[in-house]
Every structure is written in C-alpha cells, then in structure tokens.
Image (cartoon, helix red, strand yellow):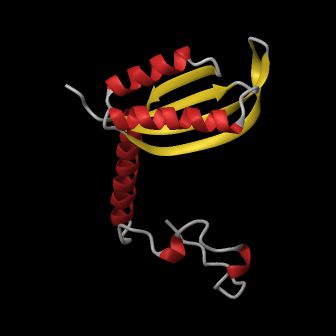
Amino acid sequence: MSQTRQYELVYIVSPDASEQAIAELHTQVEQIVQRFNGTLDKSENWGRRKLAYEIGRAREGTYVVETISGSGELMKEIDRRLRVTDTIIRHLIVRVDDDLRVAERLRGERKATQARRRTARGLPPEPLPSERRGDRDDNDADDGGLEAPEVQR
C-alpha cells in the first residue's frame, strides 16, 4: 500500500564538492523520484553556509532543500542513497503533509470564527478591501486627515 505523501529533504554537501558534483547529486535524487513515480515539487540551493558546529573537519557546507511528493518506499531509497554518498555531510527527511493539513484546517477555522463574529456585529462576513490591514500606506489616508468618530459600545 503506497500512499503519496509530501516530504521535505534537506542535505548538506561537503565544501570540497564542486557545483557540478552538487548538480549530479540533484540529478540522482530526480532519477530516484522518477523511478518510484514521485514528483519533485520544489528544489532550492541555499548555497554555502557556515555550519552551527564542526562536522568531521567541515566548518561550512552547501545546503540544498527539496520538496518531494511520493511514497515511503521512495524516501527509504533516497535515505539509503544519501547515507552512502561521501559528499553528503548530513541529510534530513521530514514528512510535512500533516503539518500543512493542520495549518490549512486552523486557517479555515480562523476564517469561520472571524465571519461569525463579523456577522454578529452586523457586518458582512468578509472584510471589505478598505478594512484590511496592510493594504494602505500611511500616506493613503482617504479621510482627508480627519480621525474617525469614536464608536460607543
């Protein structure tokens, strides 16, 4: 039973590795993903950065972050391959689909609560464009410099 899930793969490449070696690692990951019928959603090369602590003799490395959709078998194969690759200092695979689903549910609940509160106050459920925060600059005051009257509750 292979279920498609979303994972985030982060690996740190040795500072001795060339740009071509990093590109070849990326190509290897792409080929594994294709062979297991997954998709490589996003790939970011964060570049060379200083490590938080020394790993082996390396004080810095090239960080690469990839978002992959696929099965657990796919991620097991990528993990196995990255463990035996000498140019990889460290790697980490994290499943992120549950976190994204929870965040989406909380966003929906927040919008529903906001709509319910606005309706109870006699306002439309969705804020008007003029009511949204951050839509206007400080210079965009449309009240001509006058302050709004205070509302009694």
User: What is the x, y in percent for residue 120?
Assistant: 34, 63
Res 147 quadrant in image: bottom right
Q: Nearer the viewer, residue 32 or 105?
A: 32
Against 137, residue 51 (above or below) is above
Res 68 quadrant in image: top left
Q: Is residue 16 left or right of residue 9?
A: right
Against 67, residue 90 (above or below) is above
Q: Is residue 4 left or right of residue 150?
A: left
Against 84, residue 139 (above or below) is below
Against 101, residue 132 (above or below) is below
At a point 76% along the width and 26% down the height, the residue shown is 16
Res 102 quadrant in image: top left
User: What is the x, y in percent for residue 35?
Assistant: 34, 34
Extreme residue in the bottom direction: 144
User: What is the x, y in percent for residue 91?
Assistant: 57, 22
At a point 35% along the width and 48% down the height, the residue shown is 109
User: What is the x, y in percent for residue 27?
Assistant: 52, 37
At a point 66% along the width and 38% down the height, the residue shown is 20
Q: Can I make out residue 6 in this image? A: no
Q: Can I make out residue 114 in this image? A: yes
At a point 75% along the width and 35% down the height, the residue shown is 48
